[in-house]
Structures are given as structure tokens and as C-alpha cells.
Amino acid sequence: TCLIATGDFFVFRKRFNNAELGCLGAVVVGAFVYAAHDLSFDGNGYTWLTVNVGILVASALYEKHAIVSVDQTPVGISCVQNVLSIPIIVVFGMLVGHEHPLQTLETTGTETRVAMLLTGVAGCSLSIASMSLGKFASATAISLAGNFNRVVSIMAGAALFSD
């Protein structure tokens, strides 16, 4: 989030108010608290995390640029983005050994198919919401909202799945 904020500042000339700076400070403190208590530190894992963060930052800033510079509705941008992800999904599916996904789908139960359908609908809905938000919110604000969403999910998961 802080790297996205840095990009937001330099690329889009975003200025931050005190509340936003406080939130960014909380993200930094939270990252240090997490890292200090990481019981399973693995250099290889942190290397891949660094790669992931670099891609995430580039993607967030490019997505913001595309949203504000292209004359397209949020639904249109979402559709294009989702269609462009299909070849990537197919390639990764083949890499992990799913050469015949439709045949595999035929053997799944109804509950699994319904769950897959609902997951797809939820994913498309989130994509449309994200593109709509991107029209008027900064890349930093979107990233902060995503981080807050993760905190809520972690707390809900801890409450629901505790021993």
C-alpha cells in the first residue's frame, strides 16, 4: 500500500491529508509487527512476496491509469479485464495438469458447480465494483480499502474457525 501511495504521489500527483497519512503509518506499523512475529520466516517466501508486491503495485497504478484515461464504462473495463485473464487461466490450468477441464467439470457434484458459479458471479461483481471505485478514488484509497477488507476477513475467520 505504501508503494502504491508513492506511485500515486509521483505518477498521479496525489496529495495526502493527515488521515490518509495516519492510515499509511498504521499499515507500516502493522507490517513490522507481522514481520517481527513471523514464526515461519523463509527467505525464498519473502523473495516471492517481493515479486508479488512489485507486480501488484504496477498493476494497481496501471489499472488506475487505464480507468481514468479510457473512455469506457466500469462494466466495459471489467469485461475486458476478465476476458484477458482467460488465456492466463488456461495456461496455468495446463501447467498444473488439467488438460481436460470440461471433462473434470462433468464429474463434479452439483454443490461444487453451484459454488463455482457463485464464486464467478461474486468475482465479476467485485471487479465491476472495483472499476467503478477506480473512476473516482485514488489507487492508494483502493489499496487501503483492500487491506481493511483483509483485516475484517482475518478477524471473521479467526472467530468462525477457532478451536
Image (spheres, grey):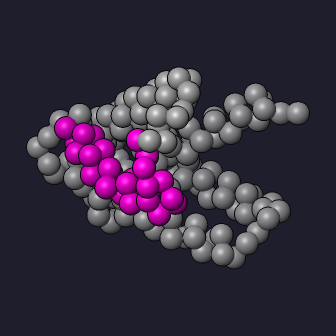
Compare residues 113 and 48 and report the one nearer the observer.
113
Residue 64, placed above or below residue 106: below
- Farthest residue, direction left: 71
| Position above or below: 48 against 125 | below
Q: Residue at x 47, y 63 (%)?
A: 95
- 130 up-or-down from 17: above or below: above
Q: Find out whether residue 99 is within the magenta segment.
A: yes
The image quadrant of residue 93 is: bottom left
Does the rendering let one see residue 15?
A: no
Report x, y in % for residue 29. Answer: 67, 57
Residue 50 on the magenta segment? no
Identify which residue is drawn at 43% across, 46% down: 101
Segment tinted magenta in the rendering = 76-102
- Find residue 139 and report its horizontal and vertical position in percent: 37, 50
x%, y% of residue 102? 41, 41
Q: Is residue 6 left or right of residue 13?
A: right
Residue 120, given in percent of the width and then of the height, sits at 42, 33
Name, please, the residue furthest toward the right: 163
Left/right of residue 100 with respect to residue 22 in the rendered view = left
In the visual, does 155 lie left or right of 112?
Answer: right
Quadrant location of the C terminus?
Answer: top right
Q: From the image, give the main secondary structure of the stretch colored magenta.
A: helix
Depicted 10 relative to depicted 82: above or below = below
Residue 124 appearing in the image:
yes
The residue lying at 50 percent from left, 65 percent from top is 52
